Amino acid sequence: MIMLFKAFIMGIVEGLTEFLPISSTGHLIIVGNLINFKGKFQTMFEIVIQLGAILAVVYYYRKKIGKSLKNLKPGEWGYNLWYKIVIAFIPSALIGVLLNNYIEKYLFSPFTVAIAMIVGAFMLLIVEWAFSNYKIDNIDEIDTKRSFLIGIAQCFSLFPGMSRSASTIMGGMIAGLSTRAAAEFSFFLAIPTMIAATGFSLVKNIAAMTTTEWEALTVGFIMSFIVALIVVDRFLTYLGKHSLRAFAYYRLIVGILMIGLVLSGIVK
């Protein structure tokens, strides 16, 4: 029951933070340390429950996705949309496969994540200041070149703490998208990205999982789905009226807090 309760908490944290540019990894590390939810299973758990958040996006955009799948012939709207998503997906997929073991071994530490959160905060502020004059407010207008640029930007998210959402949104803004359009493209790009990451992690660990761990995954999955579904809608509404500065300042505070917790020995 204790394991399931911890999975319940972690699922809520994942759902709250996955699509906001504040690093779900950083928050999961902090909360995981505070509730003593650590170890090899935790790393795999954090990756797999992201699929619950991704399915929330699929459900939220179910009509648009359904329509796109009915128009998958070359030259049609659906084909063009998913072609651009695939183009953006390729860079991080290739680099992720090549560097996955290195990243898990050397970069998944509270200190490196804290540094990434702080660096990402400054990057958010700089990108928003330098690329505030956008040209595109609809993801259907994105061309292949801009898609690939966003895909390159997503590679920064392979460094734990940078945030996949923050990296792709910044990439979108640099490519000339409004913050809302960049966020929407980030949501769609998350679908193949996180499904691939989840599948890769499950294949590596599925044989060693216990019944309790499967139950914990299920609880975390469900909670991340429910919470993320609420967050996606609220985040898009927020971006229609506000900038990203609040998220940057929040990242700075959390990053500094994490460094303090690491130095004090509370978070390891």
Image (tube, helix red, strand yellow):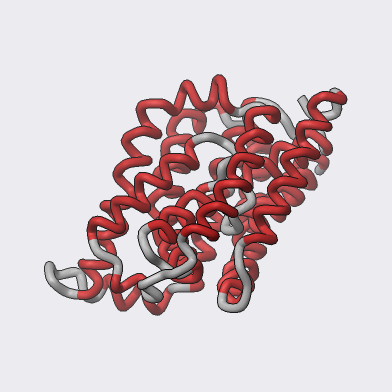
Using the rendered view, name the quadrant where residue 147 is placed.
bottom left
Using the rendered view, name the quadrant where residue 1 is placed.
top right
Q: Residue at x 69, y 61 (%)?
A: 246
Rendered-image quadrant of the C terminus = top right
- Determine whether, in the image, residue 18 is placed left or right of residue 131: right
- Say whether residue 84 is visible: yes
Residue positioned most to the front? 130
Q: Nearer the viewer, residue 129 or 266?
A: 129
- Vertical order, 37 against 230 (above or below): above
Q: Position of residue 223 (x, y in %)?
A: 67, 58
Residue positioned most to the left? 74
- Vertical order, 201 against 141 (above or below): above
Q: Nearer the viewer, residue 119 or 194?
A: 119
- Determine whether, in the image, residue 132 is placed left or right of residue 39: left
Q: Position of residue 228 (x, y in %)?
A: 61, 62
Q: Position of residue 245 (x, y in %)?
A: 65, 60
Using the rendered view, name the quadrant where residue 172 is placed.
bottom left
Q: Residue at x 36, y 33 (%)?
A: 95
- Say whether residue 223 is visible: no
Q: Position of residue 103 (x, y in %)?
A: 50, 26
- Vertical order, 159 against 5 (above or below): above
Q: Residue at x 49, y 49 (%)?
A: 167
Give the total number of marks visible in the rendering. 0
Q: Residue at x 51, y 29 (%)?
A: 205
